[in-house]
Amino acid sequence: MVSRKTSFVTPLARWPSWMRRGLDAIVTVGSLLLCLLLLPTRIPGMELLGIGPNWLLIWVVAWSLNRTVWQGVLAGLTIGIVQDGMSSSHPTHAASLIAVGVLAARLQKQRYIQEDFISVALVVFGMSVVAETVTALQFSIDSLWGDASGTGRSLSEIWTYHQRVTLASAILSSLWAPAIYFPLDRWWGKMNLLE
Protein backbone atom coordinates (compact mmCIF):
# COMPACT_ATOMS: atom_id res chain seq x y z
CA MET A 1 0.00 0.00 0.00
CA VAL A 2 1.40 3.40 -1.02
CA SER A 3 0.97 6.27 1.42
CA ARG A 4 -0.32 9.68 0.35
CA LYS A 5 3.01 11.32 1.10
CA THR A 6 4.91 8.86 -1.07
CA SER A 7 2.41 9.15 -3.92
CA PHE A 8 2.83 12.94 -3.93
CA VAL A 9 6.61 12.91 -3.78
CA THR A 10 7.23 10.03 -6.19
CA PRO A 11 6.02 11.69 -9.44
CA LEU A 12 7.86 14.92 -8.64
CA ALA A 13 11.00 13.01 -7.68
CA ARG A 14 11.16 11.68 -11.22
CA TRP A 15 11.15 15.16 -12.69
CA PRO A 16 14.48 16.77 -13.59
CA SER A 17 15.77 19.23 -11.02
CA TRP A 18 15.26 22.25 -13.28
CA MET A 19 11.59 21.35 -13.81
CA ARG A 20 11.01 21.01 -10.06
CA ARG A 21 12.65 24.39 -9.46
CA GLY A 22 10.52 25.91 -12.21
CA LEU A 23 7.34 24.47 -10.71
CA ASP A 24 8.41 25.72 -7.28
CA ALA A 25 8.95 29.20 -8.71
CA ILE A 26 5.54 29.12 -10.42
CA VAL A 27 3.80 28.11 -7.18
CA THR A 28 5.71 30.72 -5.15
CA VAL A 29 5.14 33.59 -7.57
CA GLY A 30 1.55 32.45 -8.17
CA SER A 31 0.79 32.53 -4.44
CA LEU A 32 2.32 35.99 -4.21
CA LEU A 33 0.25 37.20 -7.16
CA LEU A 34 -2.88 35.78 -5.53
CA CYS A 35 -2.07 37.72 -2.35
CA LEU A 36 -1.47 40.87 -4.43
CA LEU A 37 -4.88 40.46 -6.08
CA LEU A 38 -6.61 39.79 -2.77
CA LEU A 39 -5.09 42.83 -1.06
CA PRO A 40 -7.37 45.53 -2.54
CA THR A 41 -10.38 43.20 -2.67
CA ARG A 42 -13.01 43.68 0.01
CA ILE A 43 -15.02 40.47 0.13
CA PRO A 44 -18.20 40.78 2.24
CA GLY A 45 -17.67 39.40 5.72
CA MET A 46 -13.91 39.62 5.36
CA GLU A 47 -13.41 43.15 6.62
CA LEU A 48 -13.56 44.90 9.95
CA LEU A 49 -13.97 48.68 10.22
CA GLY A 50 -13.33 48.88 6.47
CA ILE A 51 -9.98 47.09 6.83
CA GLY A 52 -9.20 43.72 5.27
CA PRO A 53 -6.51 41.16 5.99
CA ASN A 54 -2.96 42.13 5.10
CA TRP A 55 -2.32 39.31 2.64
CA LEU A 56 1.18 40.46 1.74
CA LEU A 57 2.21 40.53 5.39
CA ILE A 58 0.92 36.97 5.78
CA TRP A 59 2.96 35.92 2.73
CA VAL A 60 6.14 37.58 4.05
CA VAL A 61 5.68 35.81 7.40
CA ALA A 62 5.10 32.47 5.65
CA TRP A 63 8.24 32.99 3.54
CA SER A 64 10.47 34.27 6.34
CA LEU A 65 9.66 31.73 9.04
CA ASN A 66 11.71 29.03 7.29
CA ARG A 67 14.40 31.21 5.76
CA THR A 68 17.39 33.33 6.71
CA VAL A 69 17.16 36.93 7.87
CA TRP A 70 18.58 38.18 4.55
CA GLN A 71 15.94 36.28 2.61
CA GLY A 72 13.29 37.83 4.86
CA VAL A 73 14.76 41.30 4.23
CA LEU A 74 14.82 40.72 0.48
CA ALA A 75 11.22 39.45 0.45
CA GLY A 76 10.02 42.38 2.60
CA LEU A 77 11.85 44.93 0.44
CA THR A 78 10.65 43.48 -2.86
CA ILE A 79 7.05 43.03 -1.81
CA GLY A 80 7.03 46.42 -0.08
CA ILE A 81 8.14 48.11 -3.30
CA VAL A 82 5.46 46.25 -5.25
CA GLN A 83 2.82 47.31 -2.70
CA ASP A 84 4.08 50.91 -2.92
CA GLY A 85 3.55 50.67 -6.68
CA MET A 86 -0.02 49.48 -6.17
CA SER A 87 -0.90 52.19 -3.67
CA SER A 88 0.65 55.29 -2.21
CA SER A 89 4.39 55.08 -1.71
CA HIS A 90 4.18 57.46 1.22
CA PRO A 91 4.68 56.11 3.79
CA THR A 92 6.57 53.23 2.27
CA HIS A 93 5.33 49.71 2.90
CA ALA A 94 8.85 48.37 2.42
CA ALA A 95 9.99 49.50 5.88
CA SER A 96 7.22 47.64 7.68
CA LEU A 97 7.57 44.48 5.57
CA ILE A 98 11.36 44.45 6.03
CA ALA A 99 10.83 44.62 9.80
CA VAL A 100 8.33 41.76 9.54
CA GLY A 101 10.71 39.66 7.41
CA VAL A 102 13.60 40.15 9.83
CA LEU A 103 11.58 39.43 12.97
CA ALA A 104 9.82 36.39 11.51
CA ALA A 105 13.14 34.89 10.37
CA ARG A 106 14.66 35.55 13.80
CA LEU A 107 11.70 33.85 15.51
CA GLN A 108 12.25 30.66 13.55
CA LYS A 109 15.99 30.70 14.16
CA GLN A 110 15.36 30.95 17.89
CA ARG A 111 12.71 28.17 17.69
CA TYR A 112 10.15 30.20 19.60
CA ILE A 113 7.27 28.92 17.50
CA GLN A 114 5.80 25.58 16.65
CA GLU A 115 4.10 24.56 13.40
CA ASP A 116 0.46 24.82 14.43
CA PHE A 117 -2.48 27.10 13.74
CA ILE A 118 -2.28 29.01 17.00
CA SER A 119 1.46 29.72 16.77
CA VAL A 120 1.23 30.98 13.21
CA ALA A 121 -1.82 33.10 14.02
CA LEU A 122 -0.04 34.63 17.02
CA VAL A 123 3.08 35.38 14.98
CA VAL A 124 1.00 37.07 12.26
CA PHE A 125 -0.93 39.01 14.93
CA GLY A 126 2.33 40.29 16.40
CA MET A 127 3.82 41.07 13.02
CA SER A 128 0.68 43.03 12.07
CA VAL A 129 1.15 45.15 15.17
CA VAL A 130 4.80 45.72 14.24
CA ALA A 131 3.97 46.63 10.63
CA GLU A 132 1.20 49.06 11.54
CA THR A 133 3.39 50.65 14.22
CA VAL A 134 6.19 51.23 11.70
CA THR A 135 3.65 52.89 9.40
CA ALA A 136 2.30 55.06 12.23
CA LEU A 137 5.85 56.08 13.12
CA GLN A 138 6.42 57.20 9.53
CA PHE A 139 3.24 59.31 9.68
CA SER A 140 4.35 60.73 13.05
CA ILE A 141 7.74 61.75 11.70
CA ASP A 142 6.03 63.47 8.77
CA SER A 143 3.69 65.25 11.16
CA LEU A 144 6.59 66.51 13.27
CA TRP A 145 8.88 67.51 10.37
CA GLY A 146 6.49 69.13 7.99
CA ASP A 147 3.81 66.87 6.58
CA ALA A 148 5.04 65.90 3.09
CA SER A 149 1.94 63.80 2.47
CA GLY A 150 -0.42 66.74 2.97
CA THR A 151 -2.70 64.89 5.41
CA GLY A 152 -2.28 67.50 8.15
CA ARG A 153 -3.03 65.08 10.98
CA SER A 154 -1.90 65.66 14.53
CA LEU A 155 0.01 63.05 16.53
CA SER A 156 -3.04 62.24 18.63
CA GLU A 157 -5.14 61.63 15.50
CA ILE A 158 -2.43 59.44 14.00
CA TRP A 159 -2.08 57.24 17.07
CA THR A 160 -5.83 57.02 17.72
CA TYR A 161 -6.37 55.87 14.14
CA HIS A 162 -3.34 53.56 14.47
CA GLN A 163 -4.97 51.69 17.35
CA ARG A 164 -8.12 50.92 15.35
CA VAL A 165 -6.26 49.96 12.19
CA THR A 166 -3.77 47.80 14.07
CA LEU A 167 -6.40 45.86 15.97
CA ALA A 168 -8.60 45.25 12.92
CA SER A 169 -5.66 44.31 10.69
CA ALA A 170 -4.07 42.05 13.29
CA ILE A 171 -7.30 40.18 14.02
CA LEU A 172 -8.21 39.59 10.38
CA SER A 173 -4.67 38.78 9.25
CA SER A 174 -4.14 36.29 12.07
CA LEU A 175 -7.45 34.56 11.32
CA TRP A 176 -6.59 34.14 7.63
CA ALA A 177 -2.89 33.36 8.11
CA PRO A 178 -3.26 29.55 8.19
CA ALA A 179 -5.04 29.63 4.81
CA ILE A 180 -1.86 31.02 3.22
CA TYR A 181 0.84 29.67 5.52
CA PHE A 182 0.09 25.96 5.70
CA PRO A 183 -0.30 25.17 1.97
CA LEU A 184 2.87 27.14 1.19
CA ASP A 185 4.79 25.63 4.09
CA ARG A 186 3.85 22.10 3.01
CA TRP A 187 4.79 22.84 -0.59
CA TRP A 188 8.16 24.39 0.29
CA GLY A 189 8.85 21.55 2.72
CA LYS A 190 8.20 18.93 0.02
CA MET A 191 10.39 20.83 -2.45
CA ASN A 192 13.22 20.94 0.10
CA LEU A 193 12.92 17.18 0.66
CA LEU A 194 13.23 16.56 -3.07
CA GLU A 195 16.34 18.73 -3.33
Image (spheres, rainbow, N blue to C red):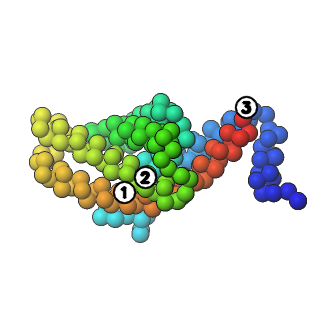
Name the amino acid, label 1.
Ala
- Which one is earlier in the sequence, the residue at label 2 or at label 1? 2
Mark 1 highlights which residue?
170
Marks 1 and 2: in contact by CB < 8 Å? yes
Assess disc 3: are there few (<14), some (14-19) or many (≥20) residues with their C-alpha within 10 Å of its C-alpha. Answer: few
Q: In which quadrant of the rendered image does the N terminus lie? A: bottom right
Q: Measure the C-alpha gap from mark 3 to mark 2.
A: 33 Å
Question: In the rendered view, does 158 fall on the left or right side of 1?
Answer: left
Residue position marked by numbered label 2 in the rendering: 124
Residue 75 appears at what percent x and percent y? 47, 36
Q: Is residue 35 visible?
A: no
Q: Secondary structure at mark 3?
A: helix
**Is 163 rendered above or below residue 10?**
below
Tag 1 and tag 3, C-beta contact below 8 Å? no
Residue picked out by circle 3: 18
Is the residue marked by circle 2 packed among few (<14), some (14-19), or many (20+) residues within 10 Å? many
Three-letter code for the amino acid on which mark 2 is drawn? Val
Given residues 159 and 111, the one toward you in this image is: 111
Q: Position of residue 68 (x, y in %)?
A: 51, 33
Q: Residues within 10 Å of mark 1 (few under 14, many from 20)?
A: many
Residue 136, by quadrant, is top left
Say which amino acid is labelled 3: Trp
Rendering coords of residue 154 (x, y %): 11, 48
Q: Earlier in the sequence, mark 3 or mark 2?
A: 3
Q: Residue at x 45, y 62 (%)?
A: 175
